Structure formats: C-alpha cells, structure tokens
Amino acid sequence: MSRTLYDLIGLAAGIAFILALKGLSHPKTARKGNLIGAFGAGLATVVVFFYASPSVSGKAESSLPLNNLGWILGAIAVGLIIGVPAARRVQMTQMPQLVALFNGVGGGAAALVAIVEYLNLGLEATTAQVVFTVFTVIVGCVSFSGSIITFMKLQELMTTRPVIFPAGRFVIAATLLSVIGVGGWVVSALGTTPLLILAALSLLFGVLFVLPVGGADVPIVISLLNAFTGLTVAASGYVLDSVLLIIAGTLVGASGTILTRLMADAMGRSLFGTLFGAFTAKQQDSSGVADDRPVRSGSPDDVAILLNYARRVVIVPGFGLAVAQAQHTVRELADLMISKGIDVAYGIHPVAGRMPGHMNVLLAEANVPYDQLVEMDEVNPTFGQTDVAIVIGANDVVNPAAKTTPGCPIYGMPILEVSNAANIIFLKRSMRPGFAGIENELLYDPKTMLLFGDAKSSLTKVVSALKAL
Amino acid sequence: MSRTLYDLIGLAAGIAFILALKGLSHPKTARKGNLIGAFGAGLATVVVFFYASPSVSGKAESSLPLNNLGWILGAIAVGLIIGVPAARRVQMTQMPQLVALFNGVGGGAAALVAIVEYLNLGLEATTAQVVFTVFTVIVGCVSFSGSIITFMKLQELMTTRPVIFPAGRFVIAATLLSVIGVGGWVVSALGTTPLLILAALSLLFGVLFVLPVGGADVPIVISLLNAFTGLTVAASGYVLDSVLLIIAGTLVGASGTILTRLMADAMGRSLFGTLFGAFTAKQQDSSGVADDRPVRSGSPDDVAILLNYARRVVIVPGFGLAVAQAQHTVRELADLMISKGIDVAYGIHPVAGRMPGHMNVLLAEANVPYDQLVEMDEVNPTFGQTDVAIVIGANDVVNPAAKTTPGCPIYGMPILEVSNAANIIFLKRSMRPGFAGIENELLYDPKTMLLFGDAKSSLTKVVSALKAL
Amino acid sequence: MDAMAILSIFVLSVFVGFEVVSKVSSTLHTPLMSGANAIHGVILVGAIIVADHSETNLELGLSLAAIVLATINMVGGFVVTDRMLEMFKGQKK
Amino acid sequence: MDAMAILSIFVLSVFVGFEVVSKVSSTLHTPLMSGANAIHGVILVGAIIVADHSETNLELGLSLAAIVLATINMVGGFVVTDRMLEMFKGQKK
Ligand SMILES: NC(=O)c1ccc[n+]([C@@H]2O[C@H](COP(=O)([O-])OP(=O)(O)OC[C@H]3O[C@@H](n4cnc5c(N)ncnc54)[C@H](OP(=O)(O)O)[C@@H]3O)[C@@H](O)[C@H]2O)c1
Ligand SMILES: NC(=O)c1ccc[n+]([C@@H]2O[C@H](COP(=O)([O-])OP(=O)(O)OC[C@H]3O[C@@H](n4cnc5c(N)ncnc54)[C@H](OP(=O)(O)O)[C@@H]3O)[C@@H](O)[C@H]2O)c1
C-alpha cells in the first residue's frame, strides 16, 4: 500500500472520529456516532497491517508482513478477550469505574509506546521527539495510575473520602518537582534509566494527585485524565509521524477538556478547586453531626397512603439510588402508581448520581420510558402542581442551601425545587448529609416525611404497601 | 522576519478568523467577533510587508522592502478611499447589494492573483498549481460577474424578475461546457491566451448563471458566491503556499455553504431549484391576475379606530416595508400606540425582507427596542390573544397556503399565523401576490381589512389619524 | 508543505467552518454572511505577494488591480458589518 | 510533515473538538466521555507500529503490553458506550 493511500485512509479515520464525537453529542445520533467511531478505529487498525511504515529511527526494517506479526495478533486477541467481556458484563452502576479503567490502560499504552519508540530511536532522537516522548511518558503514566486510583475509589476497594495525609501537599509538590526535574534530565542527558525513573515518579504522582479527590469529584478527574490521555496520543502521533494519531488525540484532548468543564459547571464545582484539592485540602470533618431538631419519620404504609391519594408525583433519584441499585424497584413503584392513574414523572438533576447523566443511564436500563424523564429546567416549574415529591437517595441536588447559604460548597448550583411540592418524602438511611457534607434544612421541614433504610428495601416495602391498599 | 515567525503570525490570523465566525454566530458577541476578524486581517496584511516571501517561481527576487512598495501602498490607499466611504454611507436598505459587490470584487481579486501568479510561474508551474489556478480563475470570475448582476438586480438597475431568454438553458449549458473545455486546454497546453479566454468565458457564465434567478432568491445566490470566493482564496493559498489563505478561504467556503443552506431552508426554497433555475426555469407568468372575489378595503381612519381600541397589536413587517423604507414611520406608529397603553410587538419572520435577518437590521436602524422584536416561534402562540395583526408590506410570510396547499412554491415554509388574530390589516399597494407569486387567501378573509397604497404614506396617514382620535 | 498536510488542514477547516456557524439564528444570517465576506478579503495578502513578485508591467498592473479590489472587499466588508451590528448594540437590555 | 503543518493541524483539531461537543446535553456527558475514551484507544495503531519496529525483546515485550492495553481501551470502550446508548434506544418514540 502506498504512503499516500495509507495517509488518506488515516485521514478518513480521523474524519470518522470527528463525526463520532458530533454524533455522540446528540441523543438521536449518539449510537450511530459511536459506531462510526468504532468503524474508524477498526479501519485504522486494519490498514496498519498493510503498510510497512518506515521506522523513524531508520534502524528496524519494516516490510510486509509486519515483523512480529504473530505476536501482534496474539496481543490483540488477548486484549479482546479481556476487554470485550468486561465491557459486556459490567453492571451499569459500575460503568463509571470501567470507563476509568479503560482510560487508564489507554494512558498506559501511550506511555509504553513512547518508551519503546524512545528505546528504538536511541541517540538519534531529535530534541523535539524527546520532549514529546517525555510529555507522553509523564502524562500517560499519571493517567494510568490516577485512573487506577479512581477505579479503586469508585469500586470501593478503598475509601471514597479524600485521602489527606500530613504534609501531603509538600509530598505532592516535591513529587511534581522531581517529575519535572527528571523530565529535564531525560531531555538533556538521554538514556534509558532516567526515562524509567521518570515513569516511576509519574506513576507515583498520579496516585498522589488523585488520592485527595473526594468520591463525588471523581468523574471530573476521570474526564480530565481522559483528555490528558488524548493529548499523549497526539504527542505520540508527532513522534510516529501519524496525522491520524495527532487528529484523534487532539480531538479527544479538546473535547475532553470542554466536557470536564461542562461537568464541573453542571455540579457547581470549580475545576481548579477539584484539581488542586491536593494542594489545598484540609482534613475535613464531615462526619455529619446530626442535628437535635425533631424530624418526621414515617413507615412504608404512611408513604403508600400519601402516594395513593396523590394526583401527581415527582420521583427525584440521586446518588443513593445508584448505591442501592434500586432502579428496577423504583420503576416498579412508578408503574404501580401509573396503573392507579397517578401522573408520575422523574425529575432528573444533571449531576445526580455518580457521573453526569448517570441517572438517565440507570433508569433507561430499568426500562423507564424516556418521556417520563424530565430535565431539571422543565420539572422545576411543575413542583407547584405536585402533590408528592419522593426523593430517593438524593440530597445535595434538592438542598435549598444551594440558594440560601452563600459560601456553602454547593452555593449557586441549580437544584430541584422539591420544596414547592405539597409533600416531600425522603428515602435515606440516616440523617447524614450528602456528598457536599452540609445539613439539608428540608429534612426538618414540616411537610417532609423521612423513610429510613436502604432505598431498595424501603421501596420494596412501599410497593407492597401500595399494592395492599 | 523569519519564515517561522511569519507562519506563526499567519496561523494566529487564521485563529482570529475562526474566533470571528464563532463570535458572529451569537448576538452578544457578534460585534466583537467582527472586530477580531478585522484585527486578524489587519495583522496578516501588515506582516506581509515584513517578510520577503520567496517567489514560487523562484524568478523574481523578493527582499525587504518589497518590490513595488510604493505602488502597493498606493493601491491599498485607493481601495480604502473607495471601500470605506461606500461602507460608511450606504443606506441600510441597500446593504444587501453592497455585500454582493464586496463579494464580487473579492472574487475578482482572487482571479487576478491567480492569473498573475500563473504568468509569473510560466512553464515552471506544476500540474497541481495549474489546476488550482484554473479553478480560481473560473470561480473567481463567476463570482465577480455573478455578483455584479446580483448587485444590479438588487439596486434595480435591471429587472428583479428572472431573466429567461429563448433557448437560454442551451446557451448556459454550452457556456459551461466551453468553460470546462478551455480549463482543460489551459491545464494541458498552458499559455496566457487560453487563460484569458477562460476568464472571459467564466465572466460570461457568471452573468448567465445569475440572470435567471428571481430577485428574492438573490440573497441565496450571494451567499453561495461568497462561499465560492472563499474556496478560490483557499486555492490561491495552495498556489502561494500560504496556510493562512488556505484556512481563511476554507472557513469561508464551509461556513458560507452552511449559511446558504440555512437561508434556503429558512425560506423554504430548495437550494438546487434556486441554482439550477437557469436550466429549468420556464417563462413564468406571475403578473398576478387579480381574483374577482370581493375584499374589504378600508381608509386610514378605519385602521386608526381599530388600533385605538385594541389591547394588543402585532406588527408584521415584510419585504414591502423595506421597499417603502417605512421603518421609521412604523416605529412612530408603534410608539404612539404604546403611549396609548396598547401592547405592541413586532412579529419577525426569519426571511421577511430581502435578506435573512434583514427586518431586524432595518428595525434596529429605526431604533426599535430590541425586546419588541419577537421571533416567529415565540410570537405565533400569542396571536390568539392579539386584537389586531397589522401586516405591512408582507405577504408570503403570512400566507396560509404554505400550510394548506401542498405543491405550492412555499409549501412547508413556517408562517406567521396572523389568521388567529381577531383582526388583520394589510398595508399593500395592490392585490398583486408576493414574491412566490401565489394568491393569498387571507386577503379575502372577512376579518381582513386592506389599506392600499405605499406602506410609508399609508402609515403616515394612519399615524395622523390615530393622533387625531 | 506536503499535500497530505494541506489536505488535512483543508478538511479540518471545513469542519471548523461548518460547526462554528451551524447554530446561528436567522437574525444574524446577514451580518454573518457579510463578516465571512470580509474575511475572504484576506486575499489582499496574496495580492501583495504577487505584486512583490511581479516582473512585467502587465503583472504589476493586474496585481495592483487585485490589491484595490481586495482592499475594498476586506475593509469595506468589516466596516459595513460593524455598522449592521452596531445597530443591535445600544438596544440589548 | 513540517512543524508548521503539524501545529496547524493541532490547532484546527482543537477547535473541532471544542465546537463539536460544546452544546452536548448533560444526559450525554457520560456516553460522550466514554466514546471519546474509546477513540484514544487508536493508540493501538502506534503500538502496532512500534511492535513492528521492535528490535530487542524488551522493546517487543513492552510494545505487546501496549497492544493489549490499547486493544482493551479501544474495543472495550466502544462496546461499553454502545451498551449505554442502547438503553436509550428502544424508548425514544
Ligand atoms: N453526577 C455527577 O456527575 C457528580 C459527579 C461528582 C459529584 N457529584 C456530586 O454528587 C452529589 C449528587 O447529589 P445527590 O443528591 O444525587 O447525592 P448526595 O447529595 O450525595 O446524597 C446521596 C444521599 O443518598 C443517601 N444514600 C446513600 N446510599 C443510600 C442507600 N443505599 N439507600 C438510601 N439512601 C442512600 C445518602 O444518605 P444516607 O447516607 O443517610 O443514606 C445521601 O444523603 C452532588 O453534590 C454532586 O455535585 C455528582
Ligand atoms: N428574507 C430573505 O432572506 C429572503 C430572501 C429571498 C427570498 N425571500 C422571499 O421573499 C419573501 C418575503 O416575504 P414577505 O412577506 O416579506 O414579502 P412578499 O411575500 O414578497 O410580499 C411583499 C409584499 O409587499 C408589498 N409591497 C411591495 N412594495 C410595497 C410598498 N412600497 N408599500 C407597501 N407594500 C408594498 C407587495 O404587494 P404590492 O405589490 O401589492 O404592494 C407584496 O405583497 C418570501 O417568499 C421569502 O421566501 C426572502
């Protein structure tokens, strides 16, 4: 295959990636977009087997069929055997951590490619190539180890709270400085050992960087690491002289950056605060000292009665619903109410759950009809005509402090205004606050009823009580 | 100045153009966007004086200061002396033709640049360079002469009706074929004479191409020629090895194409139909045979009385308002009504007037407050609560045939649903139909009152009658 | 610059051009068209380059004509667009 | 490909990336992130190229590891994104 044809097919794959991102940005075309992306990636992969790409170092001869062809195909097979079942079998509630993991391995792959190319180039590498290699190794390793930590946090293999150790910020700053220092060393002195030290330090930095991030900020970090990995791919494209990798990597880097900002905005977080939490975080006390004021708690029967006589009910799902995996049960409850002639809608806050749009995915998995999912801006004006708002494992996204308490962590975040509903029911396990660690006045509101317990078992009880009525 | 610096500044100018188009797409940033674009263009122009760009042919020596510097600066001064006052003084109603003219001279400039470079390259030109030169000459010349014709149509230096002459389509097809043929000749044989013949034929084709287009389709054609000119600039960029010209030209080409489609969509026209009107148009009889059915026509006093007792009035301006230049008078009427406590809004159809958005510009010029301008989608639901809809020089944009008569030229175009208002007043000069040449049933509606006459004088009369009440 | 690079730049510019204007409201169609029109006046840069390279009077004459036309296109275009947009300015909120 | 071309391609790709996703609704944040994630799995191409060029066992071993990881990233990413989006599918009208 001629270089021109090879390049043209690469450009076509790049165009496919643009169309993929474009498609993924609109609900109607999202699935097609993803398929176009997969097609582009497949095309680019197949084509590389038919082109003997000249080594940048000029040392290794490339000819068709490729050297090490058997090994290459074998490695791809291993990747398929690991990747496909993982992607197929994962439960939707665990999807965020899988995405984190996939991102991490991508970053790791980019770092490895850079290292190999560096070994291969040896002393012939130009300064620009070495600089890009250093960049790829640092960022790829950070992305790899950082993603592993986010995976462990989300999978609850470790605490989801920010991990802050004494003098942590100095350790992190020192690590960062040594990463930069060793990077400079590699550029000036060349050599394999410095590069491996650089990789090790970068891996360490990735760990330290993500440890202080709280569980709920993790999606922002994943998105950021994703953008980082994109940039490493672009840098590899420079070293390997591949327009495709440059375009694809830059696309992901740019769109990932925007996406990170959109996510942070949607949850009212400052991107800066999230990222440099490492440097500024204080050991925070959010054990949630329960207030002494009285609350009105009820039984599943009380809830069922309230629901039974309502004309309109809005269900507000949150983080806790995902934790309890109660999406199927909530759907059962909704169906039951609908069969009783009650008007039911789900009020979806953009950042409810563990990742933006997470609620939509979870509820879609439970086959909740799309038209019952109402976005925040549309559902808010309707709470005035709502008899019961039933808040399931959500807290921050309905907390009026976002509007009334300047200076509190969620101040300014738009909320679901359930306080306008005639009755509010909270399903949660305790009086503990939500992710942001702040009291929710609504829990003490006279029109609020609390139903304590795991969301799933509470809902099951409510369903049977409602059926019995 | 080093090549690298020169190229970087060129890229910066390209980025400025991207930001300019981005800014121009949003009302709040539009003006800033335009200024950024002007800045980029200025930057690119200034920088070229500080870089001795090697001739592609390698023949002419370039050194600083540039050869012919005095001539160059003089020519720029001439351009400024012609361009700035024209842009400053033009009346807003004549702005479309000025844009057409500016586009045309741009196309002409691109064609001239291509010709000079071709002369300069002589026999050393590569085939690719010649192909791009031929492209630029053809499209630039078509854009030039086509724009001149659109200018003359809009300025009413010639008829605005489609000009169709017998066997016209054969003449056009023959011209197009000879353009292509001579283009091929230039590529294969090279030489100055064929190139000049090519230019002449292309100019002729531009004229023939635009003549059959009706006056109201002209904005679509301007937009298309604009996109064409962009592509010629990109092609020149290839020949002159300038990334800036490639980026800038392609941006304009792409955004111009989209814009052309958006415009055609907004006015319910098929792009294809408009463009290939030349090949398909039949001598059409749209003299507008007036129907015999009775209509209710009124006097300015009748209109004033109707308005005086209305609570809500929607003003629907159209093409005829622009023709009559009645924008200031209509504002006077609106102010008078508002001072009488009447609720007044303008219902703006996207394609009312001579160009998309034209009404907004005209009414803004007359200082109509922005918040009184209501877009179609927002104003339509309010006609039910409207006492009087006063349609000033508009016709097609309120014609219910767009909804009721499949197959009519405007079928499918969204309209302003004035028929839902309690009373409708039409200000027009005759029973002649609008641009699309189709009867408007609404004129015969019992709740319609017609006030015949030029929009401006009619409005003046209505204003004095209303003042007298 | 090699053909592949130019092609890539072209393709990417097409996408940028498409995306950037694809959501524009019809109110801004005319100013946007006019602004884009002014942008292609940057052919002035090309006209200056060929004027610099001109060797014969014919070449010089043609390139000076190109400079005049391109300047009109560029400067006039930005000025007229600014005038259009200026009218919207005072009135927003 | 010269540095200027690469820089231009980079800059333009940044704009395309920005523009293309800038209006995405929050419902699609997660699938979009996941899809973009899969796209950078195309580093697989790079991994195959370096495996082809590998001369030592160390190089080969590292590049095979890169291939495994990149394949997981790419294929797993597209599959999981498709699964997410599939759930929306059946329900829209
Ligand atoms: N979606 C995103 O992209 C995203 C990303 C990062 C951060 N965030 C942040 O996460 C928060 C999300 O708000 P949210 O209202 O959905 O969640 P939240 O404020 O964290 O509240 C979740 C509530 O669910 C309850 N809960 C936990 N497990 C439960 C179970 N098994 N059964 C019943 N209840 C359970 C918890 O109370 P108990 O412990 O008393 O049961 C808690 O009050 C926001 O602050 C948002 O900014 C979201
Ligand atoms: N805006 C755009 O971008 C654009 C571009 C191309 C095409 N178009 C097309 O142009 C049409 C625009 O619709 P429209 O409703 O605004 O205009 P229209 O349908 O062309 O109607 C204009 C009306 O104004 C009347 N008129 C003309 N001069 C007048 C004067 N001096 N005083 C009073 N009345 C006068 C005419 O009737 P008399 O002759 O009886 O007075 C005519 O009925 C649409 O078909 C649209 O698709 C628009």
Image (tube, coloured by chain):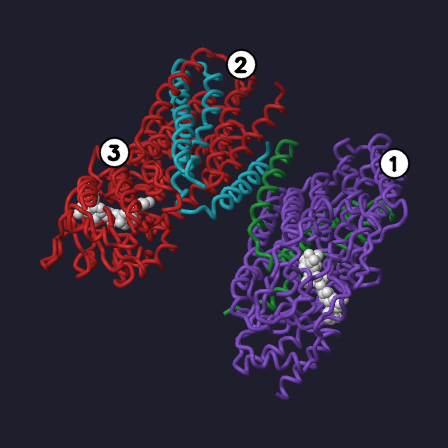
Chain colours: A red, B purple, C green, D cyan
What secondary structure is marked by label 2?
loop
Q: Are marks 2 and 3 in contact (CB under 8 Å)?
A: no
Q: Nearer the viewer, mark 1 or mark 2?
A: 1
Q: Nearer the viewer, mark 3 or mark 1?
A: 3
What secondary structure is marked by label 1?
loop
Residue B79 position in % (x across, y down): 76, 60
Residue D49 position in % (x across, y down): 49, 21
State which tag comes first along the sequence, 2 or 3. 2
Residue at image position (18%, 41%) is: A464
**Which amino acid is tagged 1?**
Gly
**Which amino acid is tagged 3?**
Gln
Residue at image position (55%, 31%) is: A243
Q: Which residue is mark 3?
A: A155
Q: Which residue is mark 1?
A: B191
Q: CA distance from mark 1 to mark 2?
A: 47 Å
Which of the labelled discs sits on residue A7, or is there none?
Answer: none
**Which amino acid is tagged 2?**
Glu
Q: Nearer the viewer, residue A377 or A223?
A: A377
Residue B293 position in % (x across, y down): 74, 66
Q: Which residue is mark 2?
A: A61
Q: Residue furthest left?
A: A292
Q: Is residue A356 left or right of residue D39?
A: left
Mark 1 surroundings: few (<14), some (14-19) or many (≥20) residues within 10 A: some
Q: Nearer the viewer, residue A311 or C46?
A: A311
Q: CA distance from mark 2 to mark 3?
A: 45 Å
- Image quadrant, ligand 2: bottom right
